[in-house]
Image: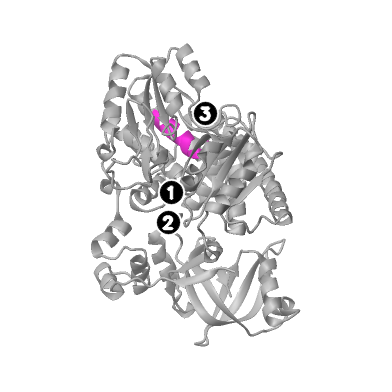
Amino acid sequence: MEKWFLKNKRGDASALADALQISPVLAKILINRDVNTEELARTYLEGNMQGLHAPELLKDCVKAADIVKKKVIEKKFIRIIGDYDCDGICATFILWSVLTELGAHVDYCLPHRIKDGYGLNISMIEDAVRDGVDTIVTCDNGIAAIEQIAFAKEQGLTVIVTDHHEVPFVELDNERRFQLPAAVAIVNMKQEDDTYPFKGICGAVTAWKLGQVLLGNEHPVIKALIPYAALATVCDVMDLMDENRVLVKEGLRILNTCPPVGLEALIRVYELKDKAVSAYHLGFLLGPCLNATGRLETAEYALKLLTMTEPEQALVYAYELKSLNDTRKNLTLQNTEKAIAELKAAGHDEDKVIVMYLPECHESLAGIIAGRIREACHRPTLVFTKAEEGVKASGRSMECYDMFTELSACKDLFTKFGGHKMAAGLSMAREEDIEELRKRLCEQCTLEKEDFVEKVHIDVAMPMSMASLQLAKELECLEPFGNGNPKPLLAEKNLLLTNGQLLGQKGNAARFTVKSSDGSTHQVVYFGNLQIFHDFLEEKYGPGASDKLYRYTCAFPINMIYTLQVNTYQMRESLQIQMKYYC
């Protein structure tokens, strides 16, 4: 069972509400999210593209742009090397579009997940030399490619790195010493001496920032590329704060008014054309389609879709991507169920750090499965699969566990390694070292028992009688919702659950009637796991309680965390209260 916490940060909600002409509820939510002054709140609610940080503040961004411009003038062959996930695909497309607009002699290369692995490798550099490439520009990778870039330099290549991953380091005499590749310019806000004001941008936004310097902030190509920066931001699970929030907001505006051909095809495939595309759709529908190609085929298939200008042709590609993603989802479900069963059978489901080996699993699914296991067991998780040479793993972490730092202490076991606090990838030469890694990670882990309990942070304790369609609409101004900016959670104690009705053909959702202590009644919908909810009722109120709820009038006391949303049906709007947690 999760642990509930009520946020209660200091601030004058009444004064903020009066100054901005908003409700005290919205003002309190803003204060609890550290948006606690009128100036901050106006920027948060009304912020626009003019409020973005200047790209020139990124270390080496101007230097990299100057080198690229010189190479374009000299007609040198430039190759962009990206990554096979949504962030890497969008970053590559952004740089390719910018350099094409500049008139560069440019092409791109995305690594094959199985044949090449993540980022730069020696064979890709050899290919570049053979093809007559003069300059390599990386995006969403390169910061950890120390040996590879040294080799490229020996071959006479110019290498520019644009990346957002953590800089590798070694510990010497209790001092962290960072190791940078020998590129002529490194654009990565995670560098120790980089003073860029916001460290949370993804690889595609980093590439877009370089594009701003190359073409200018107001160039139509730069504006047209915002949806790709927004899509990558959501799919790479960046915090939707600061300039990320502004970029995603603007990206969604463009997608809902005049989307580019390739993304419009995906919107049509998912029947979203007449609906408001949200950050949810980016993260759970459109983005995974691009990711699926890098997982099960080649990511260049997804990149091809983004370059298309003919709607009908793009639609064919979009349907193919959706089909691939559907296949990926089925494989993920099967492997996740198998993995959790194996974990429990082996007694490793309560290890401080879960290290799982699935030799028969397609290696491209490891990261998603690691995320599912982390959600189920609430523990940092690494999932290994068999690779062409040794084994490979993808890891997913929690806020209280810095996976990159913890793995850095074990990198003598790795042949390749990179990532950041919340996610990492690595390769090892021998299967036998998986157990050694498990042992080391668990022994050095300092997490305590309470760290493994899911923590739910309530924005405002509020009786349901205060809920209204007007308030639900007002809370929409906090969008886009996502990592770092979740949908507001409201809560009320001592409700009475009086009756219920199963919804849908499969009965996998429900509508409940609840009564507040003030006597008011409310309709609440629930889309979570009904079996677990029924087990909760049976345990708390006796055998047959769940059946009773759907057949008779009951009075089951319950505490509830809920959200508000605007439900639109046949052009009519209504308030929908959705139960998220209960106890």
Can you say which quadrant of the picture contains the N terminus? bottom right
What SS does tag 3 mark?
A: helix
Assess whether mark 3 and mark 2 are in contact (beta carbons under 8 angstroms): no
Does label 2 or label 3 sit earlier along the sequence?
3
- Which contiguous range is marked in magenta? 85-95
Looking at the image, which residue is at 57% across and 45% down?
Answer: 270
Q: Position of residue 92 (x, y in %)?
A: 44, 31
Mark 3 = which residue?
304
* Closer to the eye: label 2 or 3: 2
Does label 3 or label 1 sit earlier along the sequence?
1
In the image, residue 372 above or below residue 144:
below
Q: Residues within 10 Å of mark 3 (few under 14, many from 20)?
A: some
Q: Position of residue 228 (x, y in %)?
A: 43, 39
Q: Position of residue 465 (x, y in %)?
A: 47, 80
Mark 1 = which residue?
238
Mark 2 = which residue?
484
Amino acid type, residue under disc 3 in the picture: Lys
Residue 390 placement: quadrant: top right
Q: Residues within 10 Å of mark 1 (few under 14, many from 20)?
A: some
Relative side of 521 to 56, left or right: right
Looking at the image, which residue is at 34% across and 20% down?
Answer: 103
